[in-house]
Image: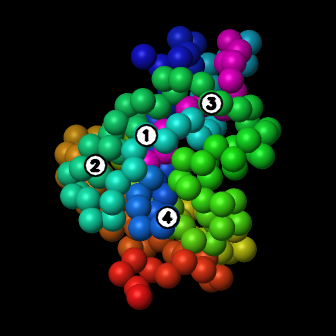
Amino acid sequence: MRRSNFTNYTHAETLIYEFRNKYFVIEHCQQGVELNPVHGTRQFPGEYCALSASLPLDCSTDEMGQEVIKAIDDFDTRPPLFESWDRRALGKALCGWLGARGIPTLEKNCRIVQVVQYFEENIFKIYPYDNNNLNPWHGRYEGREIVLPGSATPEQIGEAVIKAFSLSTYHPERKDPPAGSP
């Protein structure tokens, strides 16, 4: 059960990181440890909440899809461990979940894919991320998203996530060698 009985939920989301030869599915929630009904029914932006799953790079597309759906289903079922303004706590939690020494190491050695389920449109959008190649920041690689119907199977979602990773970019100053390199 989602933690707000007054929010008009329009979407649910998750981020998947590929870092050090693993995929990490991150559960999201609305920003704010405490949600305040005074702010109205508008859904707050997403925030990291917990590590939902860690998968090997050779996981099946069905397994990937099942873990993504689980993280989407768990969207906003618990509060974040920190307030949205506490970027240091966010970085520490994220690095702890992924086993990174720090945010600079993580940012230079990862690829990211975002999956969003839009409730009104009854679709999933899978967004590859650009990591400082097209722009001097990391963010959605606009125009390359993959759209699936809300009835998509876990295997279809997993296939789309894996395809989105092939479109996502590494940071130009990447230090970690790619998987399978000597």
Q: Earlier in the sequence, mark 2 or mark 4?
A: 4
Which residue corresponds to mark 4? 19
- Whether the residues at callouts 4 and 3 have beta carbons within 8 Å, the answer is no
Q: Earlier in the sequence, mark 3 or mark 1?
A: 1
Identified at 45% across, 80% down, the residue is 178
Q: Earlier in the sequence, mark 2 or mark 3?
A: 2
Looking at the rendered image, the disc whose residue lies closer to the viewer, 2 or 4, is 4
| Residue 22 shown left or right of residue 90 in the figure | left
Which residue corresponds to mark 1? 52
Looking at the rendered image, the disc whose residue lies closer to the viewer, 2 or 3, is 3
How far, Cα to Cα, is label 4 from label 3?
A: 22 Å
Looking at the rendered image, the disc whose residue lies closer to the viewer, 4 or 3, is 4
Q: Earlier in the sequence, mark 2 or mark 1?
A: 1
Which residue corresponds to mark 3? 80
How far, Cα to Cα, is label 2 from label 3?
A: 24 Å
| Residue 119 shown left or right of residue 95 in the figure | left
How far, Cα to Cα, is label 4 from label 1?
A: 15 Å
Q: Is residue 26 magenta?
A: yes
Q: Position of residue 18 (x, y in %)?
A: 46, 63
- Whether the residues at callouts 4 and 1 have beta carbons within 8 Å, the answer is no
Q: Which mark is residue 86?
A: none
The span shown in magenta is 25-37
| Foreground of the two, 150 or 29 | 29
For badge 1, the amino acid type reads Ser
| Residue 74 shown left or right of residue 160 in the figure | right
- Whether the residues at callouts 2 and 4 have beta carbons within 8 Å, the answer is no
